[in-house]
Structures are given as C-alpha cells and as structure tokens.
Image (cartoon, rainbow, N blue to C red):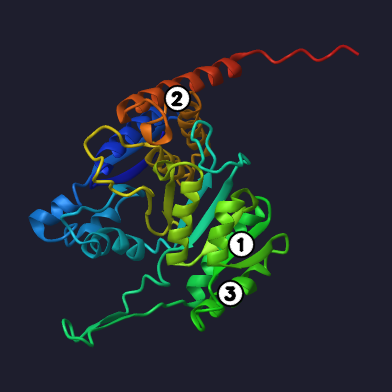
C-alpha cells in the first residue's frame, strides 16, 4: 500500500465545506486503489488570523514541508485584508516550496451549461508562471496621505522563471495537439513583455513538434470568449495567467468547477492543490458550494503523486454525477453540497463495480479460421 502524507488547510468560507466533501471521495478512492492517504489537518486561515494576528504559525512552512502534498480549500475573508490573507498563507507557500507552475485545466463538462451559444468542446491547459512577474514584493508606498502620495510596484521577470514555465508548457503541448499560445502585452509594456516573448520563443524552439503563437492578452481574452475550442495550451505570466484562467473557467459554465495545481515539478518540495473559486463568503455555510473544483484538484493531486488510474476514477465519478444532472445550483442542478457528494460517492462505487466485472469476464475465444 502506497503511503502519502497530505497536509489539509480548509481555510476560509466554503473551503470548510468543499474540503471535507472532496476528502470523503478521496478516502473512498484510496480504499479501492490500495492507497494510504494520511491527512493532517491545520486550522489556519482568517479565523486563525483573528486569534493570533497571522494566517499561520511562525513555523507553519516547516510543518508543511514534512508532507508530500498540500490540499487547500480557500483563503479570504471580509474581516481580513486580502494583502494579509494571501501574503500571509498562500503566496509564502508557493514561493518557499518553489511551486513555480500553476496549472489550470479549462474543460467542457457534460451537465455544466456554458454561456456560449456554440457547443464545441473546450479542452485547454493554462500554465501560469507562479513565483514572479507582476506579483513581486519589490516596491512600496511613499508620502502616505499627501496629495503626491506614490505607490510603486515592480514587475520582475527572470530568464530562469520564464524559461521553466515555457519548458513546462511546451512539454505539455508536445504531448497534446502541439499548439502553444503565449499571452503577451509587448505592444504596451516595453521591457518585461518583449523579454517574456523572447525567452518563450527561444525555449519553444527546443520542441520542434510544437507551434507557438504569441497573442496580445486583450485579443487573447476576446479569443477565449469567441473561439475557446481553438486553444490547446496557453502559457502566461503570473497576473495574465490568473485572469485568463478565471475567464476560461467562466466560459465553460462555472468557476465553481475549476481546479488548480501549484506545482514544484521536480518534487523537491510539496505541491499544493486548490480550487480556483475562492472562499465565496456570500454562500458560505448554506450548503450551496460546488465541490467539483476541490474534487478535481484532488484528482490532480493523485495524478501528481503517481496514481493516474485513481485520478481518472475520481474524475470519471464527478463527471458522471454532473452528466446525470445532479450538480449544485450554480450549474443548474438541484443538489446541495452534501447531496452532490453522495452522488459522486455512488458513482465511484458503480465505476468500481463495472471495472471489477469487466476484469473478471473471460477473454473472448479466438475466431475460427
């Protein structure tokens, strides 16, 4: 039996509802696939901040480093400034553990109605550079409260940071349709974005079976709405990738189904898996939260830990429940969070029974000559 130590941070808002739902499904999958997922729960987040003045303990990163993966629900509360909640928990984890790839699938799911009139299937992987770019710590404020108050924020791109994101994206494209799109704004941002373009192009040349298209981000955003099915893999900087992936999830029907993986591809540090939807305080505690994004993030975690069959089993199960029209209200279904989770658990068992029956069926006799 394979053992994996998983750090769980349910965090804030609906994170405290969707994380238990996803873990219930992960435990069922683990039982079927002979995996030992050892979950350790950390009560960090905005409530912790209210008691201690910080989002996690001083030694929080040292505690997380003892695990194989981190399973996060959501971060954010109206009671805590976003700069405190994000820079006090999620961003330090991403940077300390060199989770320099943020991978966000954007995919059409049966049972989730897209706002687009065209029903062409969408299947995109967005690779977001996750450690630098526009989300740097370099900058500051001066002359606070005065008419000439000034704020400066530096965007920092390094050849290492851009090239490793481009390598990861090009490798993915090579294993798929061979089409990589790079988001840029080099017609308006004179230094960093041309540098991004140059390094992405140089890196992609190492993948002769990959075709690179560089597209201005405003046009790319329009393209994502008008013809999203024409994309394969998109690589983007930290800020542009964040925005484009939320847009992509919206055109497939609901940001509530969108997963993400914050990856340290080399495995030197734990990677973190979280849904994209955020803490959604307006619906927290009402049983309305869609747990698909958390479940799908769990499937990505299983894939990263080396269990593709278990990951596929979980994904097939929640897709089956959606296909049967049993989704939560945000995707037009009738179910509460717990009712949808029950439907996914039932689908997990049905898929397992079908697989067991198929495996035990004797092979067909060869045709007579």
In the image, taking residue 140 as reference, residue 191 lies left or right, namely right
Q: CA distance from mark 2 to mark 1?
A: 36 Å
Q: On the picture, is 330 further left or further right than 115?
A: left
Residue behind mark 3: 197
Residue 211: give x, y in percent of width and height. 70, 62
Q: Is residue 260 above or below residue 168?
A: above
Q: Label 1 near label 3: C-beta < 8 Å?
A: no
Q: For numbered disc 1, what is the local secondary structure?
A: strand
Judge whether 82 appears above or below 303 on screen.
below
Q: Earlier in the sequence, mark 2 or mark 1?
A: 1
Horizontal and vertical percent for residue 243? 44, 60
The quarter of the rendered structure image containing the C terminus is top right
Q: Nearer the viewer, residue 254 or 39?
A: 254
Categorize mark 3 by other alpha carbons within 10 Å: few (<14), some (14-19), many (20+).
some
User: Which residue is located at x 72 percent, y 64 percent?
Assistant: 208
Q: Nearer the viewer, residue 363 or 16?
A: 16
The residue singled out by tag 1 in the image is 181
Query: Residue 348: which numbered mark, if any?
Result: 2
């Amino acid at each position: 039996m394979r053992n994996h130590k998983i750090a769980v941070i349910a965090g804030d808002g609906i994170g405290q509802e969707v994380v238990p739902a996803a873990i219930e499904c992960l435990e069922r999958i683990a039982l079927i696939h002979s995996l030992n997922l050892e979950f350790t729960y950390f009560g960090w987040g905005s409530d912790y901040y209210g008691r201690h003045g910080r989002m996690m303990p001083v030694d929080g990163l040292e505690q997380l480093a003892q695990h194989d993966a981190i399973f996060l629900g959501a971060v954010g509360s109206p009671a805590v400034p976003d700069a405190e909640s994000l820079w006090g928990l999620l961003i330090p984890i991403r940077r300390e553990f060199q989770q320099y790839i943020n991978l966000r699938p954007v995919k059409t799911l049966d049972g989730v109605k897209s706002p687009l009139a065209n029903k062409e299937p969408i299947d995109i992987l967005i690779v977001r550079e996750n450690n630098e770019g526009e989300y740097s710590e370099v900058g500051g404020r001066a002359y606070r409260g005065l008419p000439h108050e000034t704020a400066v924020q530096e965007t920092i791109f390094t050849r290492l940071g851009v090239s490793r994101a481009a390598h990861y994206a090009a490798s993915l494209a090579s294993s798929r349709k061979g089409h990589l799109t790079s988001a840029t704004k080099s017609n308006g941002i004179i230094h960093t974005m041309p540098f991004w373009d140059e390094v992405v192009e140089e890196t992609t040349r190492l993948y002769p079976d990959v075709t690179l298209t560089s597209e201005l981000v405003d046009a790319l955003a329009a393209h994502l709405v008008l013809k999203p099915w024409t994309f394969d893999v998109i690589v983007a900087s930290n800020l542009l990738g964040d925005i484009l992936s939320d847009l992509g999830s919206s055109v497939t029907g609901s940001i509530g189904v969108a997963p993400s993986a914050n990856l340290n591809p080399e495995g030197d540090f734990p990677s973190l898996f979280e849904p994209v939807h955020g803490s959604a305080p307006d619906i927290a505690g009402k049983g309305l939260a869609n747990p698909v994004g958390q479940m799908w993030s769990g499937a990505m975690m299983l894939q990263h830990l080396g269990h593709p069959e278990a990951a596929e089993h979980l994904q097939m199960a929640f897709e089956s429940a959606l296909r049967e029209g049993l989704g939560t209200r945000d995707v037009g279904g009738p179910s509460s969070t717990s009712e949808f989770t029950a439907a996914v658990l039932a689908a997990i068992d049905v898929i397992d029974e079908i697989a067991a029956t198929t495996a035990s069926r004797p092979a067909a006799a060869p045709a007579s000559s």
